Image (cartoon, helix red, strand yellow):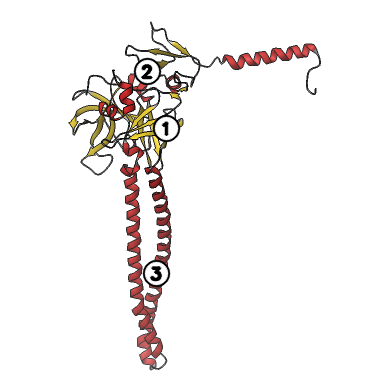
Amino acid sequence: MPGRPRNPLARGRLALLLLACTATLTSDPGHAEIYRYQDADGNWLFTDRPPPGVTPDTVDEPYAKGRAGGKDLAAALAAQFAPQTPIQQATLAVVAIEHDLGNGSGFFITSDGYILTNRHVVRPKELSQWKSSQDKLNQDAERIDALRAELTDLERQLEPLKEQLAEYEAIRDAITPERRAVLEPQYKQLSKSYRQRKARIAEAQAELRNQERSYRDSRRDFDWKSTASSVRRNFDVLLKDRTKLSALLIEVSERHDLALLKLDGYVTPALTVARGGLIGQGESVFAIGNPIGMSDVTTAGIITGLRDGKIVTDAQILPGNSGGPLLTKEGEVVGVNTARISGGDSVYDAGFGMAIPIQIAIREFPELNQHFSGR
């Protein structure tokens, strides 16, 4: 057979070489061990450096098969980012949620892939980006109407000039040279004004055609995306390491700005729910999300009070933070960030963030009720 060693010694050396290559490939000396253990509350923690006195399980590799029969995202992310604080640990469970008209945040609330977010994140007609796009289209339509009005006015002004020029041209050959010398400068000025208005009309007509074409294309694209998003069931979710996966929309709350998604086939990092009800005024909290085009951002503040059943905080909650978690300093989730109230009209004006208490979010969905019942 061509290429096959005929000498027994050569065949032996080839076998040894293949064995050495196999050992090199499988040993992977640069691969860190991943350990899994449970804390006092029964939560699974993943790390590449187990604490003293703990005898953890060993997870063979990132994205290894987990208890749910899927890839273990919790172990992989923990190994990659090696969180050192409860807040750093919590960031592993926060995701960005993308759709055609914007983006928001969400977080894993169970280790089998349930994701909490806001209703307005998955139903963009309630999203600020959707309203901004609608406002822009309305402004474009108003500019087109203004240009049409200007064009009509220019055409109306052109007609008297045209008539005056025609009248002079009709009598020019019949009048005396002296009279012609008096009227000729006026004729030239009228001719200049006529040409200028005709040129402006041509520019306005071209500008109007371009704006109408651009508006039609934008309007068609916006309407299509709005219709598609209003019935969309699958959403791209980006993990902390920017891995993109697809999650299914399970339910949208009618009463609250909440929605529940599910990422199937994976063991996921999950936030611990704060016990004992709401924390009090003045206590430290942290908001995690993906605001104004940035990803994996944490802001800090305190609880300032309650308003209409929602938690009020001075932690920065900007567009894109919606759906992310509000956490205690221990990394336990107390609320779902949902809105920002401000005295100014700029996103950067000082204001307060609003979050829906996590107990309300859990009670709203049967899947979570069942998961957390008895705890």
The answer to whether residue 185 is visible is no
For the point 41% across and 7% down, the residue is 55
Mark toward the start of the polypeptide (1 vs 2): 2
Q: Which residue is mark 1?
A: 247
Dot 2 lies on which element? loop
For the point 34% across and 59% down, the residue is 143
Mark toward the start of the polypeptide (2 vs 3): 2
- What amino acid is at disc 1? Ala
- What amino acid is at disc 2? Gln
Instruction: Characterize the local packing of mark 2: few (<14), some (14-19) or many (20 or more) Cα atoms within 10 angstroms.
Output: few
Q: Which residue is mark 3?
A: 201
Image location of residue 220, percent across then percent down = 41, 53
Image location of residue 53, percent across then percent down = 38, 5
Image location of residue 187, percent across then percent down = 37, 82
Q: Quick check: 16 left or right of 189?
A: right
Image location of residue 240, percent across then percent down = 41, 28
Quarter of image, res 331:
top left
